Every structure is written in C-alpha cells, then in structure tokens.
Image (cartoon, helix red, strand yellow):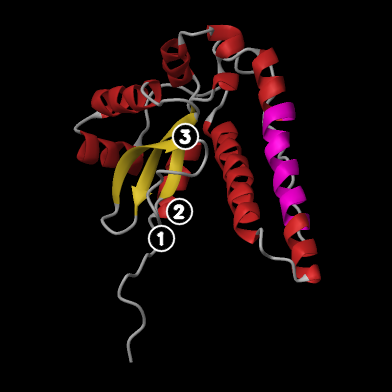
Amino acid sequence: MTKYVLPDLAYDYSALEPHVSARIMELHHSKHHKAYVDGANKTLEQLAEARQKGALDGAGTLERTLAFHISGHVMHSIFWQNLSPKGGGKPTGELASAIDRDFGGFDSFKTQLNKTAATIQGSGWAALYLEPLTQQLIIGSVHDHQQFSFQGSLPLMVVDAWEHAFYLQYVNEKAKFFDALWNIWNWADIGERYAAAKGAKLSLKGVTG
C-alpha cells in the first residue's frame, strides 16, 4: 500500500519571518501537517483490514475520515509551496491577465480573497480555483479541508484560516495574518499551477460513439 509522506519545506522554518514566525512554521508543519499524513495512512490501514475481514459496515465513517486527512495533507502541501521568502509583489503573465479578467483587477482580487478568509466560521481555508467548465478563476471558502469546494475545480492558491496557522503570533487578529501573507506569496508557483490546470478537462457529456 502506497503511503503518504510529509513533504520537506523548500525553506527553513525561520525563512518567512517576520510575516510568519519560525515557531508557528515548525508546529504547523511538523505537528499539524504530520498529523494529517499519519491519520491518512492509519485510516487506509483500517480500511484494508476491514476489507480483509469482510467487515465494511463502518466503511462510510472511515472514508469520511480519510477525506479529512488527505484533504488536509493536500491543502497544506499546496500552502507551503504557495509561499516563499522571495515572494510578494504581484503576479505577471497569463495569471495576472486572468485575475484582471475575472476579478476586475488585482486589488479587488486581493480584497475578495482576504474577506473570504476573514469571514470563515470555525476552521477552514480560502482558495483560488480554476473552474474547468468555464476556465475562469473563482474564489471559494472551504470548511475544515474538503467541504464546500467546487467539484472538479483545481486549487491554485490557498489561505489557511485555521487558528493554528496564526494564533501564536497574531492572536485573535487573523486579518493581519492574511494581510502579511501578501508579502510572501510565491507567484511563480501559483502561475505554474494555473498553467497546468488549464490543461485539465472536465467533460460532462461523456464518450459518444
């Protein structure tokens, strides 16, 4: 059985300071993210054991647990790559043009993403997606890690709005954390994700003939 693995960061825990503290990064990556990886692997083992025993009455519960952990792993993995100590500024090229087209400009895009993150109730994420049916960029909120997402859409840029992402440094002023992230967004990574996502096709007509 293939196992999920906690990815290494491309930078030191202290590299994103002063915007995100080294202590937050260490706990966030080595404790919280690792817990989702370990949880996914444990749940896969439980499902395999249940299949072997023919005892699948609890499969639905295990599958929901698996979705929680895998989605947490995916979202955090994207988040780490979306950030860079050499980040900040504004996007360029096709991504910048798409933002202008779909949001009316960078400033309105920034405001919408920040407001979406700030108004999440409880634990969750704000995310920029490419919606494959229309090929337009959309922003959405995510409850926990996986609910309320746009089916078939690919996340390009994600904002962690769980308390463990900011509380040690920003306490209850999470909006300041979301503002600080604009100093370290890795637009090269986000732009590459956009270019790759444009090649994804979601056919709702199926195969004919």
Q: What residue type is labelled 2?
A: Ala
Q: In which image quadrant can residue 9 be found?
A: top right
**Residue 160 on the magenta segment:** no
Left-right relation of 206 to 43: left
Q: In which quarter of the image is the C terminus?
A: bottom left
Q: What element carries label 3?
A: strand
CB of mark 2 within 8 Å of CB of mark 3? Answer: no
Residue 36 % position (x, y): 68, 39
* Residue of label 2: 196
Left-right relation of 61 to 140: right
- Is the magenta region chiefly helix, strand or loop? helix
Q: How far apart are marks 2 and 3 (CA)?
A: 16 Å
Neighbourhood count class around disc 2 (C-alpha, 10 Å): few under 14, some 14–19, many 20 upward: few
- Kindly identify the residue that appears in the image at 22 percent across and 30 percent down: 105
Q: Earlier in the sequence, mark 1 or mark 3?
A: 3
Q: Which amino acid does label 1 sit on?
A: Gly
Q: In which image quadrant can residue 91 be found?
A: top left
Of badges 1 and 3, the one in the foreground is 3
* Residue of label 1: 199
Of badges 2 and 3, the one in the foreground is 3
Nearest to the observer: residue 119 or residue 112? 119
- Kindly identify the residue that appears in the image at 38 percent across and 65 percent down: 201
Q: In which quarter of the image is the N terminus?
A: bottom right
Neighbourhood count class around disc 3 (C-alpha, 10 Å): few under 14, some 14–19, many 20 upward: many
Q: Is mark 1 on a helix, strand or loop?
A: loop
Q: What element carries label 2?
A: helix
Q: What range of the chain is rendered magenta?
A: 30-45
Task: Please count the marks in the image.
Answer: 3
